[in-house]
Amino acid sequence: MSKHEMVTALGRDWLEWLNEYPVGHERLTESIEYLRRGAVGELKIDEGSVEAQVQDLGPEPCKVVLQFTTVAREQWELAWSLVTPEALRDYRKGSPGAVLRRAMAVAEVNLLPERYRELKTACSCADWMRPCKHALAVLRALGEEIERDPMLLVRLRGGGPREEAEVVELEEGGEPLETDAKSYWGEHQDWSEFETSLLAGGVAARLLKRLGPVAVYGVRMDPDAMFKPVYEGVAAEAKVMLEGIRKKVRK
């Protein structure tokens, strides 16, 4: 594996996004060479912006500035409300899964900015085309930083770190579930109350916890450990679907 090879799904997404810039094969190839020979200096990363110097043939290095358009706080809050702790942990490891991608889509958050519209590049070189080869090289270097720390891309897009959701566990000897349908689901509840009790808070996979261990082909198995990810995935998809319906209704 070469020094600059992307190994995570997020890194490969970044590389594919970068290589789709309509600037020509030659410029893209030159940007790779700048990175390989160490011509890209240290990246100075601030909220929504990146600055770096790239040493070219001249005596003075080229000064590159990348400016990211930040996403509104309300959109980020909606996205985070739809992302499960498991999906967030996967993203931190460089794997943006289906739940996270769907949540970002519903909240209309583009992790990878739209070229030219949500990312502006500037360089002190005389090249008229943007992004120039120096800016492309800085974008490649930035991709390596993002692969090491995926939350860096979130911060560049204006989203602060989200604390992972606290999982409420049912203590041993807790109250059993109601067997009567009316008692379990409740009577005369409006949709908002039902949605809150079903999808937000409460005890995760409570029914599985009450079942306890079972024997499968003579092997003791824990239903909670086996099926909890399925429960959480379905709940996350349901939240994303409901939010999508709300957005359509509001429009």
Image (spheres, rainbow, N blue to C red):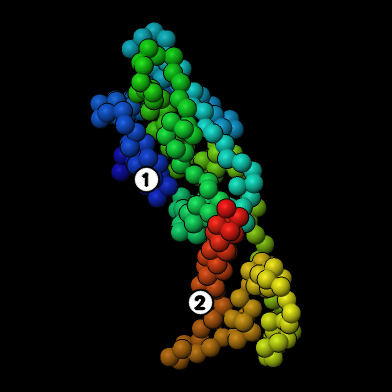
Give the residue drawn at x 45%, y 91%: 218
Q: Which residue is mark 2?
A: 226
Label 2 sits on a secondary structure element that is helix
Q: Which residue is mark 1?
A: 12
Q: Quadrant of residue 139?
A: top left
Q: Nearer the viewer, residue 41 or 87?
A: 87
Which of marks 2 and 1 precedes in the sequence? 1
Q: Is 215 placed above or below 80 here? A: below
Does the CB distance between marks 1 and 2 fall below 8 Å?
Answer: no
Q: Is 35 placed above or below 238 here? A: above
Percent coordinates x, y for residue 129 in the rendering: 35, 20
How packed mark 1 is, by other alpha carbons closer than 10 Å (few <14, some 14-19, many 20 or more), is some
Q: Is residue 188 visible?
A: yes
The amino acid type of the residue labelled 2 equals: Met
The amino acid type of the residue labelled 1 equals: Arg
Give the residue drawn at x 59%, y 33%: 47
Percent coordinates x, y for residue 8 in the rendering: 40, 49
How packed mark 2 is, by other alpha carbons closer than 10 Å (few <14, some 14-19, many 20 or more), is few
